Image: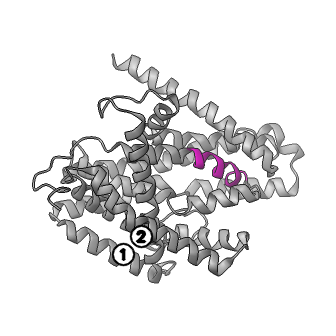
Amino acid sequence: MNKIFSQEEINTGRQREFDYLKGIFMLFIYLIHAFQATLSKEDSITQGIYMFATMSGAAIFIFVLGIGTVYSREPAPVGFVKNGIRMVVYQYLNNIVYVAALLLPYPFVHKNLSETGRENFGFLVEIYIQYTNIFFITGIIYLVLALLKKLNMKTAGYIIIGTAVSIAAPFFYGKPVNVPVLGYLVKLLIGEADFVSFTPLYFLSYALYGVAFGRILRHVKDKAVFYRVLAIPAVLAVIVWWALIFGKYGSDIPKMRAVLGDAYTQPNIWHVAASMAHIFVFAILFFFIERIGRKDSKMSEPKNPFARQILYYSRHISKYYALHVIVFFIALGINGYESFKSYQCWLLALLSIIVTEFMVRGYNRAAAIHGQ
């Protein structure tokens, strides 16, 4: 163990494998949301990708958030509180933009809308006025982490509380609180509402595990050896998970997709453990791929343009995530708020990649010029 760990914190640089992990998943988000945002039926390939994505997905971002708080330059609780409030506000500002995107085509197409189109339009506007997603749960989790930071929680405490939360969460899901306003707020935290995509209750464990892992990672002096050791239980867990899933559902992909979709937003302790194993396997894989492909300084930018783009996604992931759905909503409105065929969704995903890239890079360039 002395070969792997140090008493001092020596691994304090950027953990690039987790940057790749966040960035690469943005590509999956483009495709999956092209179907979901336009209420379109997924094809078999997308269903397969979605099932694969449910074993990481939002869990990646929340887990990496936890790691990030350990490596943050502003680790004080007050900084976490500010981040939490900012992300909650960001969620509802984002909702305004989404609703605006849905409304934008309406004056031009409302006379020719079918009954299905009108129903879809009303449904989506109602949902996205109140919508809570990754930004909201990130904000709430930041507030929880601020409290635990203030209490000087030990590393073991984060693991214990994370495990307890993942065990307890399924018993609280959808429990009604029949008190005006308070009941609504509780619903945002524990779920079971059409406008609640993810809930802080279920994803808190990933953040707590991320904090614990980040603290451990700071003491790792040989990441290659550490990751080789970690890869063994992680790979075994992934193999066992999919063996059990396919053993239970066989070739019934729609059933498997439905079950994994529910478990994705409402993970129990077993799904959390399996997701963590998948995250570790992906991160370890990226670590060794980069190690093979780049021999120069750790902090230098990779020469591969695809790798640089993935890292750019990671650095500006909030902007990409917030803006990419706008393309889908405008396209949906132009189509009379009716769903698309499979190939059209793939093309929409590509269009969103291109348009969002111009938007994010244009914004960043303008901000840089303004800041000079």
In the picture, measured across the screen, residue 349 lies left or right of residue 181, that is: right
Image marks 2 and 1: residues in contact by CB distance under 8 Å: yes
Q: Nearer the viewer, mark 2 or mark 1?
A: 1
What secondary structure is the stretch in magenta mostly built from? helix
**Where residue 244 appears, x then y in whole percent?**
57, 78
The amino acid marked with disc number 1 is Val
| Residue that numbered label 1 is attached to | 165
Q: Residue at x 22, y 42 (%)?
A: 73
**Position above or below: 177 against 319:** below
Q: Nearer the viewer, residue 65 or 302?
A: 302
Is residue 276 toward the left or the right of residue 2 in the image? right
Q: Position of residue 167 (x, y in %)?
A: 40, 80
Graded by Cα atoms within 10 Å as few (under 14), some (14 to 19) or many (20 or more), the crowding at tag 2 reads many
Vertical position of residue 98 compared to residue 59: above or below: above
Q: Within 10 Å of the Cα at label 1, are there few (<14), some (14-19), or many (20+) other Cα atoms?
A: many
Q: Secondary structure at mark 2?
A: helix
Q: Which residues are magenta?
A: 27-38
Q: Report the residue at 24% width, 52% height from top.
A: 70
Q: Residue at x 52, y 63 (%)?
A: 55
Q: Vertically, is 72 above or below 226?
A: above
Q: Amino acid at mark 2?
A: Leu
Give the vertical position of 190 relative to 36 (above or below). below
Residue 88 visible here: no
Residue corresponding to mark 2: 201
| Picture quadrant of residue 123 | bottom right
